[in-house]
Image (cartoon, rainbow, N blue to C red):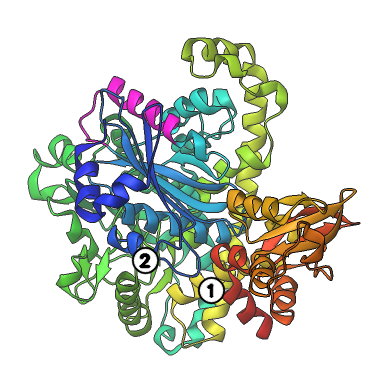
Amino acid sequence: MIPKKMGAFLKEHLPKFTLKNRLFKENGKCSLEFTKTDENLLSSIGIISDKLGPQLVACIWDENSKLEVGGYLVVDNLSMGQPSMGGIRMLPDILPSDIYNLARGMTLKNAAANLPYGGGKSGIVAERNLSSEEHKEIVRCFARLINRYKKIYVPGPDVGTNDADMKTIAIENGIDSAVSKTADMGGNRIDELGAAAGGVVIALQTLLKILPQMKILPQFSNLEIPELNEVTVIIQGFGAVGAHAARILKERLPHAKVVGISDIEGYLYDEHGLPIEDLFNLWKNKNLVSLNYFKENIISKGYKYPVKYSSNPNNLLLENAFCMVPAAPIFNYLGVGSSDNPSMTVDRIGKWSLIVEGANTYSPDPNRKAARTIMEQMVYREKGVMIANDYLVNSGGVIFAAQEHIIKTPDSLQIPDEILGNPDEVEKWLKAHAKDFAELSKKRLVAGDEYRENVIHHNMNELVEILTTHQDMLPCVVAEQISLQRLSRKESQRTAKDIMVSIPVIDVEKSIQQAAQLMIDENSGIVAVLSNEKLVGVLTDWDITKATAEGVFSNTIENIMTKNVITASPDLNLLDIVRELEQYKISAMPVVKEGLVLGKISSDIITQHFLLNLLQEQARR
């Protein structure tokens, strides 16, 4: 059945005729799909489309399930490549706009990491207090819902889901239908490794070396870079990212000190450094650490104990440290005014020199972007706190996960179709191939480590270089520019064969009536006319309309078709395609190689799915 909260949301925000006429059903699997052109409908569910996307928004649920199974899928942009990649978030109050924000973050994150995959995200609407059996069954049913989208979307784990859930999806849909799977499926064990957290630490290490360059800016003229044994860090959100960031920091910078951490139950602070190993083990065993640590270590010793505890987690941001790491799933950890409902207002924050964003904080929403700009004007420009933006530094998770597609799964390790959906049989099959999967997992792990190190080091250098060269720019603007440049560069490499779609074809001896019927059936305003399988002309809806207006009555296509056809070669690039369409004032043309028709390209395809404006801006520079 559809989750009650999801059903109520859709009924409240979508017209009745849309719920009825746009609904697709197949064996109880229901979906409502919207594209970038459905601006009004997207707006009604809180999504404002722009030049990047979204390409697809799907509201999906299983009406035959006894459990509440449903949620949202957003494929934002495929400019970097196909499929899109992004995690499955599982929360009770998730909304389409939340998933869209996260999908856009993945578009920019994958671009910043220069990965050949688009940005996508999905969300399951489910309560928190599910039994492990209910949780697994909901994930299994959701896997069946997203199976029809697996060519354009591959999920990974996110808040509320984990590597074991990705294994469940792979058992249902195939070994390559999910990433960040368990090691027995060749996965990279992202939950255990702290892949995203490692990127945060790499960013911090890089910035410690290059931050002196920032002294050229007036707000950083008095910046003091501490010695490695004097580096202090506070971490907002001691969870999957924050806990591993603390652990990895101790491994890579042994003398640095994590002086403060927080979770939903409070925060701990000690200016001399917290016992990270103890806290990490406590997190692994109990998930939440601040209150548990307080009960076990502080309460009996009172104020004499060196570690301070507060039940208000937000007050961690009042404390001083060289670096602050936001690692909680909170968009506005800082805000200018209380109306933004931030964790802390910027006028009250502790004394910091650097923020490295482990959490996903980006939003394409115009109001949120405006709020972010105001915040950075205060924090970066006036207070002189450097900000390393989220998708430039926390892409370790998707980098590791992407290796499961970059380093291909051999045919011999593809789960046989006949046992898909049968966990017991799949487990037997996995055990029989355990050695091969272990080797594949190690190979991907090595590749992920190297790729993450290089990408994040490069991103930090590029960020600092642009900020010091263009002194009026804010970090959020520069970060977005870095990703957009990589998107447009990838887009500029597209050719006709990459973007073409099928074109209806008809023999030159067929009748006009048959051609018109073909246009209707295929919903195409252009038909390729062939003779001996070679292109001899095209027939458009304009040709038929013109012939009718002029009273030309002919039984054959040849008398009214356009014979001087403008065609595109398969290797014609995107900008040249646009120039051809504009020069000859046509809306579509066939893609032809040696007389053979391969497909068609049109202005609609380009404007709906590709970054035309961005490409043209780059071309003018």
Residue 365 is left or right of residue 309, and the answer is: right
Residue 104 picture quarter: bottom left
Mark earlier in primary sequence (1, 2): 2
Which residue range is magenta in the image? Answer: 126-145
Residue 248 is left or right of residue 22, and the answer is: right
Evaluate whether residue 231 shows in this view.
yes
Pick whichever, 213 or 125, lies toward us: 125
Evaluate whether residue 95 shows in this view.
no
**In magenta segment, residue 261:** no
**In magenta segment, residue 134:** yes
Mark 1 secondary-structure assignment: helix
Residue 70 picture quarter: top left
Q: Quarter of the image for the C terminus: give it.
A: bottom right
Q: Position of residue 176 (x, y in %)?
A: 59, 33
The residue mark sitting in front, 1 or 2, is 2
Identify which amino acid the numbered label 1 is placed on. Answer: Gln
* Residue bearing mark 1: 481
Q: Which mark is residue 48?
A: 2
The crowd level at tag 2 (other Cα within 10 Å; few <14, some 14-19, many 20+) is: some
Pick whichever, 524 or 116, lies toward us: 524
Instruction: Name the main secondary structure of what is drawn in magenta.
Output: helix
Pick whichever, 271 or 329, lies toward us: 329
Q: Position of residue 161 (x, y in %)?
A: 37, 36
Identify which amino acid the numbered label 2 is placed on. Answer: Ile
Q: Position of residue 553 (x, y in %)?
A: 72, 64
The residue located at (49%, 18%) in the rendering is 421
Q: Position of residue 471 (x, y in %)?
A: 49, 87
Between marks 1 and 2, how big is the CA–CA gap? Answer: 20 Å
The residue located at (69%, 50%) in the rendering is 514
Mark 2 secondary-structure assignment: loop
